Image (cartoon, grey):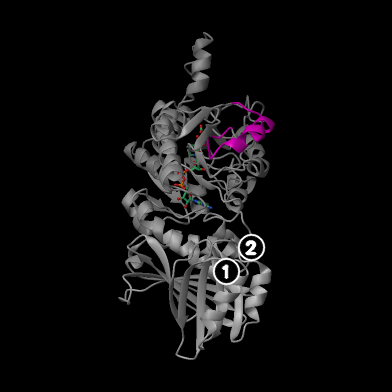
Amino acid sequence: MPKVLISDKMDPKAAQIFRARGVEVDEITGKTPEELKAIIGQYDGLAIRSATKVTQEILDAATNLKVVGRAGIGVDNVDIPAASAKGVVVMNTPFGNSITTAEHAIALMFALARQLPEADASTQAGKWEKNRFMGVELTNKTLGLVGAGNIGSIVADRARGLKMKVVAYDPFLTPERAIELGIEKADLDTLLSRADFITLHTPLTDQTRNILSAENLAKTKKGVRIINCARGGLIDEAALKAGLDSGHIAGAALDVFVTEPAKENGLFGTPNFVSTPHLGASTTEAQVNVAIQVAEQMADYLVNGGVTNALNMPSLSAEEAPKLKPYMALAETLGSLIGQLAHGPLSTISIEVEGAAADLNMKPITGAVLAGLMRVYSDTVNMVNAPFLARERGLDVREVRHDREGDYHTLVRVTVKTEAGERSVAGTLFGNAAPRLIELFGIKVEADLEGHMLYVVNEDAPGFIGRIGTTLGEAGVNIGTFHLGRRSAGGEAVLLLSVDEPVSPELVAKVRVLPGVKTAMALSF
Ligand SMILES: NC(=O)c1ccc[n+]([C@@H]2O[C@H](COP(=O)([O-])OP(=O)(O)OC[C@H]3O[C@@H](n4cnc5c(N)ncnc54)[C@H](O)[C@@H]3O)[C@@H](O)[C@H]2O)c1
Ligand SMILES: O=C(O)CC[C@@H](O)C(=O)O
C-alpha cells in the first residue's frame, strides 16, 4: 500500500481521500528540514503547502518518493529540476484557490481606496478622524493588470463588475482572449503610465523579478495604488517604500514578501501601507478545494498511474492510464532492447506509432521508450526523469504518428541513429495486452522479451541451431523459448533465446566463436 506524508497544515479532507483510495497517510506538520530528512525515506508521496521546502537534500533522502503534491499553485518551495532528475513527479492544484486569491486582491484594492485598516485602527483608538480618511472611488478608474492568467482574469472580471477599465500587460495574452475578457491589452510602459491601481498576478520568474523596479515605479502615475497577491520579489520593496514616503505612490498592499515569513520588513509602519501574511489562498472554500484536488491527484498517480497537473511530466488521465499501461510496457521493452543492442552514442531517436497506438496520448509512450533506453546507463531512470536525461545527453527525440493501417492492429517502432547507421525495432500487443517484438533491425522475428535472453546474429546455414543448442546444453543452460528470423534464405539470421539464468560472459564468448556467428550478446529485461 503506498504511503503519503502530509507535512503542512491541510484540510482533513485530504487525509480522508487518501485513506478512501487505499493510500496510507501520516500527518506530521512543523518538522525541521533535518527531522523531515530523517523520516522522508518511508514515503511514496509528500503532500505540502508552502511551508515545507522540498530541497535537493530532502529529495536525496527520499529514496521511495514518487510524487510531491502542492495543495496550491506556486511551487517555488520545490526544487523541480532536482525532483525531475530523481524521477519524482511534482503536481500542483492550479485552479482550487484562484477565486479566493482574486477576491483577496479586490479586498486589498478596497482597503487601499478607503484606507480601511488605518481608519479601523484610528476609530478603535477613539479618535473619530472623519476628515483624515478621504478615499477614492473605484468606478471609472483604470486597473493595470500585470498577468492575465487564472487569477488575473478573475480579478479583471470582478473589476469590470465594479465599472473599472482594465488594461492588461501579459505577453501571452492573445488579442482574442483580451476581447473575451473585455480588457485592453497593452505594453508595460502604457499600463504603468495609465493605471490608477496596479495589481500583480504573474509567477516569479527571471522575467518578472522586480517587474515593479525603481525605474518602472517612476513611470507610474502620481497617486497610483499597488497590490501584490502573487509573489514577493515582483516589487522592489525598497523602491516601493521610497515611493510611498515621497507621496508619489498613494498606497500599497502586499500579501507576499521577498522574505517570508515577513516578521520584520522595511515597509512595516509606512503610512498607506497595508499588509496580510500571505493570506491570498486562505479561505475555507479554497483550502477544501486544494486539499481534495491534491489528494485525488496524488492517489490517482500512486494507485493507477494517472497524472494530472504535473509540472514535470505530461498529463495522463486515470481513464487513459489502464489503456496505456500495456503500451508503456511494450515501449519500455523496445527502448531497453534498442538501448542494449545499439552501440556507441545515439544522436536521434524516433518513436513511431500506428494502428490503435496512433489514437493514444503519445507522451507517456515516448517517456517509457526513453526510460527503457536510458536504464542501460542508469538504474534510477524512470518516465519522469528519462526525457530530462535524454535532453542532457543531446538526444534528439522525434515522435511520429501514422494514420496508415499496417499489418498489425497496433504497432510501436523505435529507431535510433548511431555512428554505424540507423537501427530499428518494432513491437505490437498480443491480445491487446502482451508486448511482443515483431521486427528487429529489419528482420521479422516474433518474440516475447522477458527475463534473460541470448541474442545471436548468424549466417543462415544448416546445422547452426544444433550447434547452439549443444553449446548451451554443455554450459548447463536451459532454453525456455526460441525465436528465429532471417532476412532471406541463406542470408543473415537472428536468434533470440530465453534462458532461465543470466547468460554469462564466458558463454557469450563461446557462442561468438561458433562457425557462422556474426555477433552474440546477453540481454535482460
Ligand atoms: N497570495 C497567495 O496566496 C496566492 C495564491 C494563489 C496563487 N498565487 C500566485 O499568484 C500568481 C498567479 O497565479 P495564476 O494561477 O493566475 O497563474 P497563471 O499561470 O494562471 O497566470 C500567470 C500569468 O502570468 C503571465 N506572465 C508570465 N510571465 C509574464 C511576464 N513576464 N509579464 C507579464 N505576465 C506574465 C502568464 O502569461 C500568465 O497568464 C502566481 O505567482 C501564484 O503563485 C498567490
Ligand atoms: O498555501 C498557501 O497558503 C499559499 C498558496 C499560494 O501561495 C499558492 O501559490 O497557491
- Residue 25 forms part of the magenta stretch: no
Residue at 47% in and 23% down: 116
- Residue 36 forms part of the magenta stretch: yes
> Which residue lies under the disc numbered 2?
377
Q: What amino acid is at disc 2?
A: Tyr
Distance from disc 1 to disc 2, alpha carbons, whole Å, reads 9 Å
Q: Nearer the viewer, residue 332 or 102?
A: 332
Seen in the image, is 71 located left or right of residue 356?
right
> Which residue lies under the disc numbered 1?
339
Expressed as whole percent of the image width and height from the top left, the position of residue 456 reads 56, 77
Expressed as whole percent of the image width and height from the top left, the position of residue 482 reads 47, 72
> Pointers 1 and 2 in contact (CB under 8 A)?
yes
Q: What amino acid is at disc 1?
A: Gly
Q: Nearer the viewer, residue 486 or 115?
A: 486
> In this view of the protein, can residue 320 be seen by the observer?
yes
- Alpha-carbon neighbours of circle 1 within 10 Å: few (<14), some, or many (≥20)? many
